[in-house]
Amino acid sequence: MIRLGLCCLFKEEPIKFRTTTAKYSGRLTTAERDKKLSELCLHNAESLLKAIRFCSSNGIGAFRVNSRILPLNTHPELGYIVKQLSAGNEIENKFRECGREASRLNIRLSFHPDQFTLLSSPDPEITRKSIMELQYQSEVAEWIGADIINIHGGGGYGDKKSALTRVGSVIDKLDSVIRKRLTLENDDRVYTPADLLPLCLRHGIPLVYDVHHHRCLPDGMSVKSVTEQALATWNREPLFHISSPKEGWGKPQPGKHHDFIDINDFPMDWRTLNITVDVEAKAKEEAVLQLQRELRAL
DNA sequence: AGCGGTCAAGTTGAT
DNA sequence: ATCAACTTGACCGCT
């Protein structure tokens, strides 16, 4: 019933994604840089294929793709178009193979651009760069058949209402390759489910409900109520997030993730739903497998 | 071969 | 005013 998802990395399984830094890459000659980036992108496509197969073999139903799957792709000085890399065609073909394999094995793929990607900024330059990032992840999403690009609301700037209005107007202008995949997630500092639900309903954007963030930043709504209302925003299999606090509830830093999920943090109401739940835990695949065992044992 | 310093981006809140 | 935290290591370069 429930599809559990692994986020980006492995703890024990030897599947690695590689990256580089702008500082290092910028010191290389154009030819050296092309070679380096080609190698990294191709390596990452091959790792993604392994990740998909690992998930399938282990009963893990979803995998979140790291934002740096194509390292430095949208960097202002060092960014590049994949087709123009020397290994461009090979890279794209390998990603399309990932898509076929994910489809064959029924592994759901998603993206989660990091905190630099936000649509609420009053600065148009930040919005422009964010849209570039969404565009890049959408292109890879097209290749591999990922149906989700999930982001947070971004900054509040002391006026969340105005900020969310900006988010809405940017969303309405997005290219459909982004728009059809875009989802919004409540965070643990600024935007609660109560903040985001009206926007999600008005603009037809699904809400990724992170119950851990909701517990860190409550809004008076119950888990049950948010669950119901979040489900109603989805036109496809819903995606929710789960994690457990490292120091326990009520300690200084409830935002930090524990190695594993405490089964008591998993909402009862979710157990019978037809949903994907991404497991955000430092023990990665070990944590997903443990939660799966504990859910089955109930 | 091993280890430490460093890493593109934005915002918030602790100090 | 500065800086860690966010999702979290992985990389390069020095010894």
Image (spheres, coloured by chain):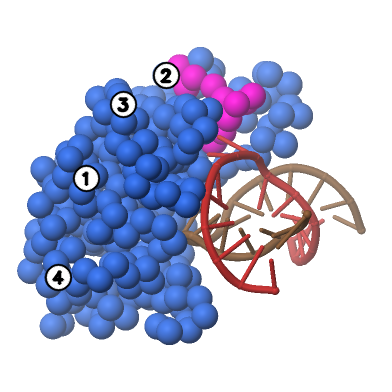
Chain colours: A blue, B red, C brown
Q: Is residue A253 above or below residue A109?
A: below
Q: Amino acid at mark 1?
A: Cys
As helix, strand or loop, the secondary structure at mark 1 comes to helix
Quadrant of image for the C terminus of chain A: bottom left
Mark earlier in primary sequence (2, 1)? 2
Bin the neighbour count of mark 1 within 10 Å (Cα to Cα): few under 14, some 14-19, many 20 and up. many
Q: Amino acid at mark 2?
A: Asn
Q: Chain of mark 3?
A: A
- Of residues A103 and A248, the one nearer the viewer is A248
Mark earlier in primary sequence (1, 3)? 3
Side of A178 where A132 appears, left or right: right
For residue A152: magenta? Answer: no
Question: Residue lying farthest top?
Answer: A84
Q: Position of residue A83 (x, y in %)?
A: 45, 17
- Residue at 67% from the left image edge and 35% from the top image edge: A22
As helix, strand or loop, the secondary structure at mark 3 comes to loop
Q: Which residue is mark 4?
A: A224
Bin the neighbour count of mark 2 within 10 Å (Cα to Cα): few under 14, some 14-19, many 20 and up. few
Badge 2 vs badge 1, beta-carbon distance below 8 Å: no
Magenta stretch in the rendered image: A70-83
Mark earlier in primary sequence (3, 2)? 2
Q: Amino acid at mark 4?
A: Lys
As helix, strand or loop, the secondary structure at mark 2 comes to helix
Q: Main secondary structure of the magenta part?
A: loop
Badge 3 vs badge 2, beta-carbon distance below 8 Å: no
